[in-house]
């Protein structure tokens, strides 16, 4: 076994079973009864709703947080959350990520005391300790639009339930690196990042496209993961722009027409 094969084998979450993935997908929605009421009549019908479940994240025996999320891609959720929140410095710091029921048990290679895992700073918009984005990535506007269309096309659960957000990460050629759907826009970002990291992708050469609006919270998640370009199909908040300006990120909106509107570091989006 060469060094690259060994690295692939040791990557947390790499050995995820296909059977478990199928079981997870089956549990992401459920059919419920509802009454459809109009001015003329009332009728009974069934409707599909997305499942929201409690997920506990544990690291080195310490409880880190509780998330309300779609109960699938839980290894990706935990890995992405720990990286996107700066609880671990890099995905390579994780030794194992193991879903167990309503929890994901994670183990780091260099264990930190709980106090060292709590971020310090000026609050939810703090960029303290986050390196500025230094990426040569350039992506064509047409590629961004195509990826946005692909995101909408493959968001099957969202179409079925109207209750989820979706996130896609792609390379400059528009090839999909990872994809996720979740009831939470933040968890959707965490899952897409985690899935890409599990696959060994270089996020400094990728763009993230999401159905959710970009706030300071989601911009900070992408920055900690090293993503230089973040695109929303919904909109961008002023807090997201402020964070992106501090960290050298490109934030853009793909509103569905022929244009991609970049608000910061627009040079990374090319005609």
Image (cartoon, rainbow, N blue to C red):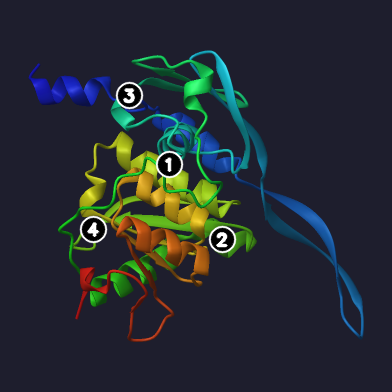
Going from the N terminus, do you reach mark 4 or mark 1 first? 1
Rendered position, 1 above or below 76: above
- Which residue is label 2 attached to? 158
| Of 206 and 236, the residue lying toward us | 236
Callout 1: few (<14), some (14-19), or many (20+) C-alpha neighbours within 10 Å? many
- Separation of marks 4 and 1 at Cα, in angstroms: 22 Å
Taking the image as shown, residue 64 lies to the left or right of residue 47, namely left
Quarter of the image for the C terminus: give it: bottom left
- Separation of marks 3 and 4 at Cα, in angstroms: 27 Å
Q: Which element type, helix, strand or loop, lies under badge 1?
A: helix
- Which residue is label 4 attached to? 175
Taking the image as shown, residue 213 lies to the left or right of residue 179, namely right
- Which residue is label 1 attached to? 84
Q: Give the percent coordinates (x, y) of residue 60.
A: 48, 14
Q: Which element type, helix, strand or loop, lies under badge 2?
A: helix
Going from the N terminus, do you reach mark 2 or mark 1 first? 1
């Amino acid at each position: 076994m060469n060094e690259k094969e060994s690295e692939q084998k040791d990557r947390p979450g790499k050995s995820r079973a296909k059977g478990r993935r199928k079981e997870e997908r089956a549990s992401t929605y459920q059919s419920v009864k509802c009454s459809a009421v109009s001015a003329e009549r009332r009728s009974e019908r069934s409707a599909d709703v997305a499942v929201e479940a409690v997920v506990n994240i544990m690291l080195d025996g310490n409880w880190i947080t509780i998330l309300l999320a779609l109960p699938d891609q839980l290894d990706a959720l935990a890995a992405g959350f720990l990286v996107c929140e700066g609880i671990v410095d890099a995905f390579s710091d994780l030794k194992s990520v193991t879903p167990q029921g309503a929890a994901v048990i994670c183990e780091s290679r260099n264990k930190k005391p709980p106090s060292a895992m709590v971020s310090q700073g000026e609050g939810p918009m703090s960029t303290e300790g986050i390196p500025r984005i230094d990426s040569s990535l350039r992506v064509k506007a047409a590629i961004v639009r195509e990826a946005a269309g692909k995101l909408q096309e493959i968001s099957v659960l969202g179409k079925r339930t109207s209750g989820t957000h979706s996130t896609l990460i792609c390379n400059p050629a528009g090839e999909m690196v990872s994809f996720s759907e979740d009831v939470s826009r933040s968890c959707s970002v965490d899952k897409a990042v985690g899935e890409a990291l599990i696959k060994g992708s270089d996020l400094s050469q990728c763009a993230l496209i999401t159905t959710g609006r970009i706030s300071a919270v989601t911009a900070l998640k992408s920055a900690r993961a090293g993503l230089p370009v973040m695109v929303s199909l919904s909109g961008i908040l002023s807090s997201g722009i402020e964070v992106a300006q501090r960290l050298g990120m490109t934030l853009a909106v793909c509103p569905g027409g022929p244009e991609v509107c970049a608000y910061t570091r627009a040079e990374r989006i090319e005609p």
